[in-house]
Amino acid sequence: MNYTAEFGWHRSRIVPYQPITLDPAAKVFHYGQTVFEGLKAYKTADGRVQLFRPDANMKRMNRSNDRMSMPPIPTELALEAIKGLAKIDQDWIPDGEGNSLYIRPFVIATEALLGVQPSLEYQFIVIMSPVGAYYPEGINPVKIFVESHYVRAMVGGVGEAKTAGNYAAGLKAQDAAKDQGYTQVLWLDGAEHKYIEEVGSMNVFFKIDGTVYTPALNGSILDGITRNSVIRLLKHWNVPVVERVLSIEEIYEAGKNGKLEESFGTGTAAVISPVGELNWRGEKLIINGGKTGQLSEKIYNDLTGIQYGKLEDPFGWMIEVH
Ligand code: PMP
């Protein structure tokens, strides 16, 4: 679908997967005006195909668009595109739990003009790919490197937008962490390197003395849809959950006092990733003996249960593809 200042969003179409042609002066290449989303379609045992909270993704996409000076896309129009394509592609989802169809909607600035002003032309594209189980051998803890040098985002910057540059900014730290045997980076705040923000592509939670804590949204953290869903599930179960500023020091302190019961990341790709180990400035903190915690396991089972249609969906999260 295309956007011009004159016609707004127009020319919706579904075409076979193919390369696209862009002018070398297209603004996306030079000034980074681009936004994306990530969501999944799941197939139930009785063959229904359903999307997990696509409306939440589209609302977030429009918040990102706004931050990047890009035009909003009417939610209904974007959902129609996603549902229409998912319907065509649904046969690509292999049967069996863990398999899904990953959906990547994105917007790029296509106006061919060098000059730092918002583009007057855009393209909205949706691509999809089947993905296999994230945990083919069962849910497994990850080891995370706490980054003390590089910064992903600053309050007042574009950290809360799902825009490409945020991810490019993290690659160097991610590579260095991988070289040391860590799969992910935990980002701290950009001003003081003290407060926990999020993991590369996940939000993060800590269970301390029976209460679940997660960093409050502060403008530099992505408002994760899995994060929001987990908070709602916990409240539904009457598990105390607190969103507030969290320092890395207090997490280490709780770990040393034996009060840190478990930790997990949340995101569309893995749903729940238990955290087995943190490494902050060379000091390792093993969490829950490096094993998956009971709460992580329960949230994982319940959320995936809702997604695969095995459990009731009390929140009306699943949207069927007709
Ligand atoms: N933070 C970042 C930076 C991410 O890229 C993602 C993945 N979209 C998340 C958090 C988790 O968000 P969600 O639960 O919506 O996938």
Image (cartoon, helix red, strand yellow):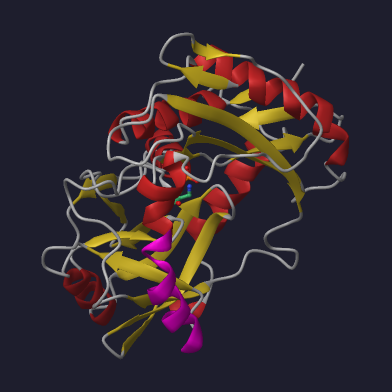
What is the residue that sits farthest to the left in this orientation? 192
Residue shown at the point (46%, 17%) measured from the top left: 4
| For residue 82, side relative to residue 131 (left or right) | left
The vertical placement of 163 against 181, above or below, is: above
Question: x, y (%) of residue 177?
Answer: 43, 81
* Residue 243 image offset from top left, x and y in percent: 24, 46
Region rendered in magenta? 168-180
Q: Is residue 165 shown to the viewer in this render?
A: yes
Residue 20 quadrant: top right
Q: Is residue 293 left or right of residue 189?
A: right
Who's the residue at 49% across and 31% down the image? 57
Which quadrant, please, contains the N terminus?
top right
- What residue lies at 17% left-to-right and 74% top-to-bottom? 249
Q: Nearer the viewer, residue 202 or 76?
A: 76
Residue 53 visible in the current orientation: no
- Give the quarter of the image for residue 165: bottom left
- Measuring 54% from the left and 29% from the top, which residue is drawn there? 123
Q: Is residue 231 above or below residue 247?
A: above
Q: Quadrant of the C terminus?
A: top right
Label tally? 0
Give the prevailing secondary structure in the magenta stretch. helix
Q: Is residue 48 magenta?
A: no
The part of the image, by quadrant, that contains residue 194 is bottom left
Q: Nearer the viewer, residue 188 or 257?
A: 188
* Spot occupied by residue 129 in the image (x, y as percentages of width and height): 74, 45
User: Is residue 178 a member of the stretch shown in magenta?
Assistant: yes
Across and down, in percent, residue 85 comes to: 74, 26
